[in-house]
Amino acid sequence: MNLSTIKSICRLFIDDKNAKMNGKTFNMDVAPKIIQHYTYVPLRFVAEAPNAKVDYFNGKDLTQLHILPRLPHVLISRYPSDAKILSEEAAIAKLKQELVIAYEKKFGEFIPLGASEKPGQDDDKAILRNVISHLKVASENDCYYVVPVMYDFWIDKYTGDIYTFYNGLAMSINKFDPYAENALSFPG
């Protein structure tokens, strides 16, 4: 690593609430500790020092910023101030494009369901065509648009990357790959 490219140097000291960054001293809420051979540092300070945003979700209050419902977690985000945010329409278009690729890989040509057509209860292909044809953002946070399909798809507002979130007994988050053999395999 070329040290001339480093913008900030931050030093934390075990059992000391004072951190040093670029020659200045900052007081932290808690001091770094070593517990059973692991070093623990104050997450908020470490994230906010390089100007990241830190939010805590308690798992219950859905008005708080969150990614996963019912699971307490910390959100840390840092995007360049000049980063362009993907619009809802562009995010939906990108997700639809990738879902169509996955659909065509599994079933053949994708034909959107007509406005007057209703998918049969047992016609998985028609149900999926209907869902893909009518994608909508259900919620969003500072990083992602959330679009429900059979499980939630998250579209990163800054990179356009797409992830799947399965909110079952065993929660899982995966990067969506429309070319994967099981791209349209849904639980249930």
Image: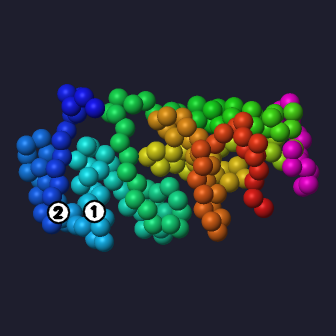
Please give the range of residues in magenta.
109-125
Q: Considering depth in this image, is 38 or 51 the residue closer to the camera?
A: 38
User: Which label is found at residue 14?
Assistant: 2
Q: What secondary structure is the stretch in magenta mostly built from?
A: loop
User: Which structural element holds mark 1?
Assistant: strand
Whether residue 133 appears in this view of the structure is no
Q: Report whether 113 appears left or right of 140.
A: right
Image coordinates of residue 170 in percent, x first then y, are 62, 65
The part of the image, by quadrant, that contains residue 81 is top left
157 magenta-colored:
no
> Is 5 rendered above or below residue 56?
above
| Number of callouts | 2
Q: Considering depth in this image, is 92 or 24 the residue closer to the camera?
A: 24
* Quadrant of the image containing the C terminus: bottom right
The amino acid marked with disc number 1 is Thr
Q: Considering depth in this image, is 62 or 57 the residue closer to the camera?
A: 57
Separation of marks 1 and 2 at Cα, in angstroms:
8 Å
CB atoms of marks 1 and 2 within 8 Å: yes
The part of the image, by quadrant, that contains residue 98 is top right
The part of the image, by quadrant, that contains residue 39 is bottom left
User: Which label is found at residue 39?
Assistant: 1
> Is 47 rendered above or below residue 70?
above
* Quadrant of the image containing the N terminus: top left
Q: Residues within 10 Å of mark 1 (few under 14, many from 20)?
A: few
116 magenta-colored:
yes
Q: Residue at x 28, y 71 (%)?
A: 35
Whether residue 15 appears in this view of the structure is yes
User: Which structural element holds mark 2?
Assistant: loop
The amino acid marked with disc number 2 is Ile
